[in-house]
Image (cartoon, rainbow, N blue to C red):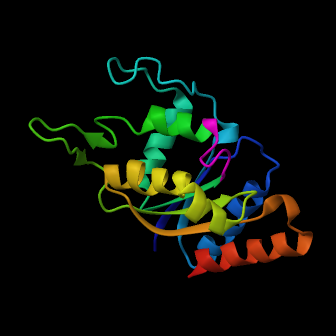
Amino acid sequence: MKKVLIINGHPDRESFCHALHQSYKKGSLSKGSEVQEIALADMVFNLNLAYGYRKRTELEPDMLEAWAKLQWAEHIVWIYPTWWASMPAILKGFIDRLFLPGFAFEYQEKSPFPKKLLVGKTSEIISTMDSPVWYYKWIVGDIGGKLIRKNIGAFCGIKNMRTTYLAVMKTSTVEQRAKWLDKIERIASK
C-alpha cells in the first residue's frame, strides 16, 4: 500500500485541475493506496517568504498540516495549470514557504550541495496548458516541469517518476477532457 499525497496547485476550486485531482484520487484508492490531499485554494497562508532564509516566518496552521502530510507521504502528485511556462503563484508561494532549510533540505558546511531531507519519496506531475506539449517542451524548455523535478524535488531528495502534460486546454472538447480524466485515473490505478 502506498501513501499518496495529492497537491492541487490551482487557485480555482472549479477548475479542470480539480476534476483531475478527483480522478487521480479515485484511481489511487482503487488500488488500495492511502490518500491525503492538499488543495491550495482551500488553504489560508501568506504566499510571501518575507525574510527569505534569514529569519524564519512561522507557519500558519494550514501550512503545519501540509507539512505533516508531506512527511507522511511516500508519493507526491503535483497537479497544476501551466501559466507563463510555470506554476501559479499560489503553488510557488506554497513551495517557498514549506520547502525550507531544516525541513526539506539542510545546508552543509564546506559543500555547495545540501543534505536532502526528503530522500525516499517519489513524485509525479500532472499539468494542463494552453500551448501544444511539443512547443512547451522543445521551444519553451519545459521550465515548470524542470523546476519541480530538479530544482525543487531532486534538490530535496524526491525522485520524479512521471510527468503528464494535458494540452491544448483552450480548444479541448468535452470528449477530450473525459478521455484525459480516464487517463489520469488509469495512471493512478497502476
Q: Tell me the magenta residue range.
A: 81-89
| Residue pictured at 15% horizontal, 38% vertical | 108
Screen quadrant of the C terminus: bottom right
Name the main secondary structure of what is drawn in magenta.
loop
Q: Position of residue 189 (x, y in %)?
A: 60, 79
Residue 95 higher or lower than 172, as above or below? above
Residue shown at 64%/68% (left/top)?
A: 134
Q: Is residue 164 magenta?
A: no
Name the side, left or right, on which 48 lies relative to 67.
Answer: right
Q: Going 37% across and 58% down the picture, which residue do you hit?
A: 158
Query: Is 162 situated above or below 21?
Result: below
Instruction: Locate residue 157, reporting x and y percent.
Output: 31, 55
Say whether residue 87 is magenta: yes
* Residue closest to the eye, 86 or 51: 86
In the rendered structure, the answer to whether residue 89 lies left or right of residue 19 reads left
* Residue 165 visible somewhere in the drawing: no
Count of numbered marks: 0
Question: Is residue 63 visible to the viewer in this orientation of the structure?
Answer: yes
- Quadrant for residue 125, please give it: bottom right
Q: Residue at x 75, y 73 (%)?
A: 180
